[in-house]
């Protein structure tokens, strides 16, 4: 499943072509452009911002890039935390069962 907002990048020709080419494998769900309470990505970012990196101020863009990438890597290795963050998003989603189709958050 691809859950996506109506942001400009998602309306690009390349995105539309990708979805069309993979329409038999992917199920898509849209939500409004600015709806952080519905967007699972926002919930995952909040875990990093408010639990893992609270009150942290990078010295420069390079340090910020390095640390944020490291923290996202840590989250990637903690699927239970990611599932919890996704469950707390207020978007109605079907249950996560293996159906042979792709599940993705965009």
Image (cartoon, rainbow, N blue to C red):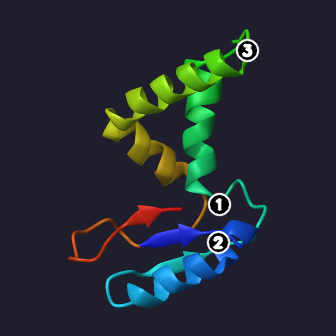
Which quarter of the figure is the N terminus placed in? bottom left
The answer to which of marks 3 and 2 sits earlier in the sequence is 2
Name the residue at the top extreme.
Answer: 59
Report which residue position mark 2 lands on.
Answer: 10
Label 1 SS: loop
* For discs 1 and 2, the disc positioned in front in the rendered view: 2
Residue at (64% x, 27% y) in the render: 49
Q: Please tell me the numbered disc located at residue 60.
A: 3
Q: Residues within 10 Å of mark 3 (few under 14, many from 20)?
A: few
Q: Are marks 1 and 3 in contact (CB under 8 Å)?
A: no
Residue 92 visible (yes or no):
no
For residue 69, the mark is: none
Residue 104 left/right relative to 102:
right
**Badge 1 or badge 3: first in the primary sequence:** 1
Q: CA distance from mark 1 to mark 2?
A: 16 Å
Label 1 or label 3, whichever lies nearer to me, is: 3
Is residue 76 in view? yes
User: Would you place residue 103 above or below residue 19 in this image?
Assistant: above
List x then y, in percent, for residue 77: 31, 33
Residue in view at x 55 percent, y 19 percent = 67
Q: Is residue 57 left or right of residue 10?
A: right
SS state under label 3: loop
Residue at the location (38% across, 84% down)? 22
Real-space CA distance between mark 1 and mark 3, rounded to the nearest whole angstrom: 31 Å
Contact? badges 3 and 2 (CB < 8 Å): no
- Per the image, the residue denoted by label 1 is 38
Q: Nearer the viewer, mark 3 or mark 2?
A: 3
Q: Residues within 10 Å of mark 1 (few under 14, many from 20)?
A: some
């Amino acid at each position: 499943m691809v859950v996506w907002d109506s942001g400009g990048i998602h309306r690009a020709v390349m995105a539309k072509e990708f979805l069309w080419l993979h329409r038999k494998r992917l199920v898509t769900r849209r939500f409004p452009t600015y709806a952080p309470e519905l967007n699972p990505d926002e919930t995952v970012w909040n875990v990093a911002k408010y639990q893992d990196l609270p009150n942290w101020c990078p010295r420069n863009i390079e340090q910020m890039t390095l640390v944020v990438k490291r923290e996202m890597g840590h989250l990637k290795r903690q699927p239970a935390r990611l599932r919890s963050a996704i469950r707390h998003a207020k978007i109605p989603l079907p249950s996560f069962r293996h159906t042979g189709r792709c599940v993705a958050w965009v």
